[in-house]
Image (cartoon, grey):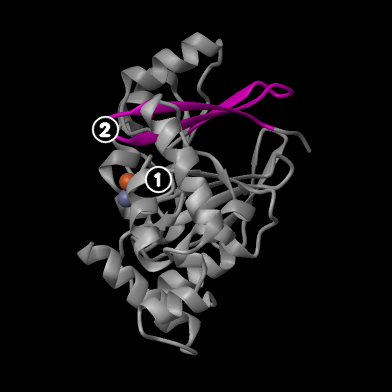
Amino acid sequence: MSKIETYQVPVLEDNYVYLLHDAEIGVTAVVDPAVVEPVLDAADFKGWKITHILNTHHHGDHTGGNIEIKKRTDCTIVGSRNDKSRIPGIDIEVGDGDTYFLGNAKAQIFDVSGHTQGHIAYWFEESHSLFCGDTIFAMGCGRLIEGSPAQMWEALSKLTALPDETLIYCGHEYTEANGNFALTVEPENTDLLARMKQVRSMRRNGIPTVPSTMAVERTTNPFLRPDSVELQKTIGLIGAEAVEVFAETRARKDRH
Ligand code: ZN
Ligand code: FE
């Protein structure tokens, strides 16, 4: 098994595309190519030849470059079996519990439906890297466009079972806005206060706040913290089930 090198490409307003490179075998995957030219330019800059596309979900800001990049590089497109009809140019279908090898680098696939149906995440254990699209964001989670709170809670629960050191490579730079909301439900969370100070200064200087780690998300992401007494108190659900606390937190974020 081998480790992947990751190169982050900011595109559009706030999307992140990732290039994953396995030097041993010489393969390079693009995770969620929103666009074409900036992705091809980034691969050229690194001297990497694109061989694969890995999609997390069907939204245009994650698949918009699929067809043209495939045309230009003859790459193989990997996507969700449960959403194959909406993944442009899909060649290889994967689903929950599958392992997929990018060169020698092994990825475990999770179905993490909730933002969309058939949304998947790729976990490269050796590299401690999780590519989760629009499920977990730094201090946030994806909007429930196609799924229920219970479904998203199940998805988040699968991902939070991963180790503390897991690097969370999500699809968007939404961190500062997410953190501003988080502070409304956990105003006295000292980890959150400290993180937001850091995040604001990073954003002022144009520095990406992604990836974060699972350890950091556990202490500061309200959507992963239904056990927080402060959160339960703020939203008026002391002692409620985790899924209820999650659902109410998500509903409040939608209105924020
Ligand atoms: Zn999306
Ligand atoms: Fe998105």
**Judging from the image, what secondary structure is the residue with disc 2 in?**
loop
Q: Position of residue 124 (x, y in %)?
A: 65, 45
Q: Would you say the beta carbon of the disc 1 residue lies within 8 angstroms of ligand 2?
A: no
Q: Which residue is mark 2?
A: 13
> Which residue lies most toward the right here?
1
Q: Which residues are magenta?
A: 4-30
Quarter occupied by residue 47: top right
Q: Are marks 2 and 1 in contact (CB under 8 Å)?
A: no
The reply to whether residue 71 is in sight is yes
Q: Which residue is mark 1?
A: 175
Which quadrant does the C terminus fall into?
A: bottom left
Amino acid carrying label 2: it is Glu
Specify the label residue 39 is tagged with: none
Quarter occupied by residue 143: bottom left
Magenta stretch: dominant SS?
strand
Q: In the image, what residue occupies the spot 51% across and 79% down? A: 229
State which tag comes first along the sequence, 2 or 1.
Answer: 2
Which quadrant does the N terminus fall into?
A: top right
Q: Is 239 in front, or is 117?
A: 239
The reply to whether residue 93 is in sight is no
Q: CA distance from mark 2 to mark 1?
A: 13 Å
Q: Is 235 in front, or is 119?
A: 235
> Which residue lies most toward the left here?
255
Q: In the image, what residue occupies the spot 47% across and 75% down? A: 230
**Judging from the image, what secondary structure is the residue with disc 1 in?**
helix
Q: Nearer the viewer, mark 2 or mark 1?
A: 1
Q: Is residue 10 within the magenta segment?
A: yes
